Amino acid sequence: MILIDTLLIALILITIIVMFIYWYSRYTAKSGFSVDENNNHIPDSWEKKFGLFFKLKNMIILILGVLIGYLLNHSTFF
C-alpha cells in the first residue's frame, strides 16, 4: 500500500504542474506577454514546440483524473 500512496502523491504533483502549464499558457496569451495570432489562448511559440500537448489537453486531464480516482480508491489515506 505504500507504493500506491507514493504513486498517488506523485500523480497529484504531476497534475498540479500540468494544470499550471495550461493556466500559464492561457494567461500569457490573454495578457499580451506572448504572441497569439490565431486566438486559441496558446502562445504561438509554444504551439510550434508542444502542439500535441495542447491538442490532447482534454484527454490528458481526463486520464489524470481517472488515475487519481483509481489510486484514491486503493490508497490508505481514507
Image: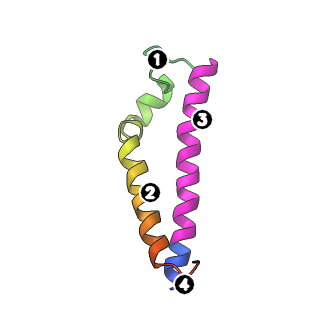
Residue 51 part of the magenta-drawn span? no
Magenta segment main secondary structure = helix
Residue 63 falls left or right of residue 35: left
Q: Which amino acid does label 2 sit on?
A: Gly
**Residue 40 sits in which quadrant?**
top left
The residue labelled by disc 3 is: 24
Residue at the spot 53% in from the left edge and 54% down from the top edge? 15
Of labels 1 and 2, the one closer to you: 2
Q: Earlier in the sequence, mark 3 or mark 2?
A: 3
Residue at the spot 45% in from the left edge and 65% down from the top edge? 69
Residue 2 disc label: 4
> Is label 4 in a helix, a strand or a loop?
helix
The residue labelled by disc 1 is: 39
Q: What residue type is labelled 3?
A: Tyr
Q: CA separation, marks 3 and 1?
A: 15 Å
Residue 26 part of the magenta-drawn span? yes
> Is label 3 in a helix, a strand or a loop?
helix
The residue labelled by disc 2 is: 65
**Residue 50 sits in which quadrant?**
top left
- The picture places residue 44, in percent across and down from the top left corner, at 47, 23
Q: CA separation, marks 3 and 2?
A: 20 Å
Q: Is residue 9 above or below residue 2?
A: above
Magenta highlight range: 8-33
Viewport quadrant of the C terminus: bottom right
> Within 10 angstroms of label 2, few (less than 14), some, or many (20 or more) residues?
some
